[in-house]
Image (cartoon, rainbow, N blue to C red):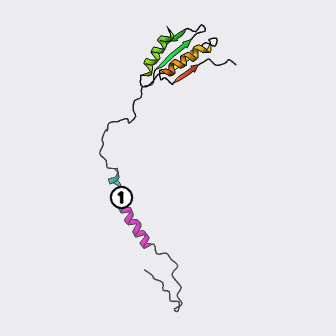
Amino acid sequence: MAFASFDQKNGSAPLSEINMVPLIDVMLVLLVIFIVTAPLLTHAVKLDLPQASSQVNQLPPSKIDFSIDASGTLFWNGEVVTRAEASRRFAEEGRKTPQPEIHLRADEAVSYRHVAQTLADASRAGLSKVGFVSTPDAK
């Protein structure tokens, strides 16, 4: 192994070669360490673990198809009802959890009074999810 001196009196120039021996020694030690530890990383116990879901099962809210025809007749899911009967059913449905959605279909020729009465009855019963159903315009 050759060493260069910092003494410039002898006329010798510094050694311009890089000594690779320490680098090779370190790399060989690392290679041996990785060869020994690599099989240990892949060793595992095979288990069939049960699968569990952390999401709460939510029941979709029911829906009520409430219709009003041109003459002002009220329909609860296709069944003819009076306003008093509709109010009683709204109160009954308002106590349920989750509250059902009301899909309100009203004929375009019906007086708005019937629609407003229906909305007021549903609101008094505590129902807030009311959707108006209509047909799109033909282009």
User: In terms of depth relative to the viewer, which is nearer, 73 or 16?
Assistant: 73
User: In terms of depth relative to the viewer, which is nearer, 105 or 5?
Assistant: 105
Spot occupied by residue 34 in the image (x, y as percentages of width and height): 37, 59
Callout 1: helix, strand or loop? helix
**Residue ID at (49%, 17%):** 64
Quadrant, the C terminus? top right
Q: Is residue 8 magenta?
A: yes
**Residue ID at (54%, 19%):** 119
Above or below, 127 relative to 11: above
Q: Based on the displayed image, in which of its 4 quarters is residue 21 positioned? A: bottom left
User: In terms of depth relative to the viewer, which is nearer, 76 or 32?
Assistant: 76
**Residue ID at (51%, 24%):** 129
Amino acid bearing label 1: Ile
Examine the residues drawn in magenta and state their main secondary structure. Answer: loop
Residue, far bottom: 9
Q: Is residue 70 magenta?
A: no
Spot occupied by residue 35 in the image (x, y as percentages of width and height): 36, 58
- Number of other residues with Cα within 10 Å of mark 1, as a class: few under 14, some 14 to 19, many 20 or more: few
State the residue position of label 1: 35
Above or below, 62 relative to 4: above
The residue range painted magenta reads 3-32
Spot occupied by residue 92 in the image (x, y as percentages of width and height): 43, 18
Q: Based on the displayed image, in which of its 4 quarters is residue 51 positioned? A: top left
Above or below, 51 relative to 98: below
Specify whether 55 is left or right of 138. left
Q: Based on the displayed image, in which of its 4 quarters is residue 137 positioned? A: top right
